[in-house]
Amino acid sequence: MRPFSKDDWSYALQELKKPRCLTFGALVCALSIALGSFYLVVGSNLRIYLTFIVKSLGCAVYGPIVGAIVAFLSDTIGFLLFPSGPYFPGYLLSEILAACIYSLFLYRERFHWLRALAAKMLINYLINVLLGCLWSYLLYGKTYLYYLTTSLIKNTLLLPIEVIIMTVVFSMLRPFLTKYLLVPRNR
């Protein structure tokens, strides 16, 4: 998706009228909430989640507008069902921004591991490290540098693993997504 193309945003808006995309969005929302309730604690306010798999796949199918709506709903409902600290709107903003970044690199584009790498680098370092550390600092009071160093290490170590997982999952699901017309055949 070209971020400033009027045609691409118009096309993304049309996804709101497609029952298959909305159904897939609901499935992604439910899977994100379910997967979000399982995580591995690796430090103070530092967790490893697997939700990136379904979120990235969803954004590749339905784009930034439905992606932002799904991010809003899954974050809000997930917090209500499985609270793991105080509610903070900064985390909601992070989820919406991550959906936009996934969409920027994966929506209406042929999947390639370099696209996954670019999306995950932006999300891991801009959203998870820079913004996530700011949110943790505002909520929990330790120094920003503390959260920055631990989050930077975690996100750097996870980056290649997440890209490999995305590449394998996208490759395995491509026939299904094409068969059910969730992605264009030329992808």
Image: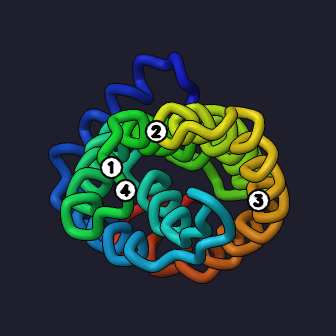
Relative horizontal placement of residue 112, taking residue 46 as reference (left or right): right
Residue, x 36% and y 46% (percent of image)?
Answer: 67
Whether the residues at callouts 4 and 2 have beta carbons within 8 Å, the answer is yes
Nearer-N-terminus badge (3/1): 1
Q: Amino acid at mark 3?
A: Lys
- Label 4–label 1 contact, CB within 8 A: yes
Of residues 97 and 47, which is closer to you in this image? Answer: 47
Residue 139: which numbered mark, if any?
2
Residue 86 tag number:
1
For the residue marked with disc 1, what is the amino acid?
Pro
Q: Amino acid at mark 4?
A: Gly
Q: Is residue 153 above or below residue 24?
A: above
Q: Which residue is mark 4?
A: 85
Q: Which residue is mark 3?
A: 154
Closest to the observer, 48 or 170: 48
Looking at the rendering, in which quadrant would you find the N terminus? top right
Q: Are marks 1 and 2 in contact (CB under 8 Å)?
A: yes
**Residue ID at (66%, 68%):** 166
